[in-house]
Image (spheres, grey):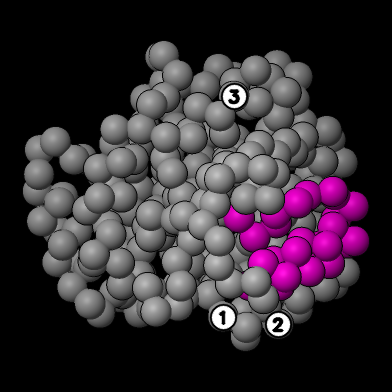
Amino acid sequence: MSAATPLGGDAPPIRRVSIVIPVFNERETIGELLSRVARAPLPAGISRELVVVDDASSDGTRDRLHELARAADSPFVLLEQEVNRGKGAALRRGFAAATGDVVVIQDADLEYDPNEYPALLAPILEGKADVVYGSRFLGGPHRVLLYWHYVGNKALTTFSNVFSNLNLTDMETCYKVFRRDLLDGMKLRSDRFGIEPELTARFAQRRARIYEVPISYHGRTYAEGKKIGWRDGFVAIWTILRVNLWDAR
């Protein structure tokens, strides 16, 4: 697909959604998360595919996933990374295995609510969008904490917008929902959280129609297991520069 060709038009019907879930050391939440994803509402006529990628967890998460995979009422594709490489690497593995018409990225930490899938899918199903971001900053209910984390998110979003010429409010959101055919020929390189600005830049370069919808957000503190840190902010800045200036495709 050419980056110069606007998307849209006569897109094929959406029959299956692939929910790609990167997991690293989330033993305490992964069972509940998979249960919520399996029960989450989807529009009539659309099936779901769960693709779970364990990124070499060391806290017993993998054993827990094996237990869950044996349960007849919780089917999912389980992929295992032998070395911890980060969220971006896990997502690339999951994307390659996804067979749905639309991909939903879902974190395993219960910060994001799968019950919001219908709102996230609606602009794509209505033929208005190729990509939908769930924004934590458009008025949805959210847990109040970590002011400097909020400032960092807004700064990175603004920096990304400068180069992508988008007006996103939440580039770093987990909830990115997109037509799977957007991945055709897309060379993603980021291993860690740099995958967020890299995907954003690639969508912009393909002239995808991007929508944002408000979502709720149930954030965690670092004591509760939050993993992204200030070093990832510097990686995001470098990634924004790389994919928009030196590695634009």
Residue 117 percent location from the top left of the image: 48, 33
- Answer above or below: position of 111 versus 56: above
The residue at the far bottom in this view is 231
How packed mark 1 is, by other alpha carbons closer than 10 Å (few <14, some 14-19, many 20 or more), is: few
Is 23 or 242 nearer to us in this picture?
23
Residue 175 percent location from the top left of the image: 55, 48
Q: Which mark is residue 189?
A: none
Q: Amino acid at mark 2?
A: Phe
Q: Which mark is residue 229?
A: 1
Q: Amino acid at mark 1?
A: Gly
Tell which tag, 2 or 1, sits nearer the viewer: 1
Q: Which residue is mark 2?
A: 234
Q: Is residue 3 left or right of residue 225?
A: right
How packed mark 3 is, by other alpha carbons closer than 10 Å (few <14, some 14-19, many 20 or more), is: some
Q: Who's the residue at 28% across and 59% down the image? A: 29
Is 154 or 201 nearer to us in this picture?
154
Q: Quadrant of residue 246?
A: bottom right
Is 117 or 3 nearer to us in this picture?
117
Residue range highlighted in magenta: 149-173
How packed mark 2 is, by other alpha carbons closer than 10 Å (few <14, some 14-19, many 20 or more), is: few
User: Is 217 within the magenta?
Assistant: no
Q: Which mark is residue 122?
A: 3
Q: Quadrant of residue 41?
A: top left
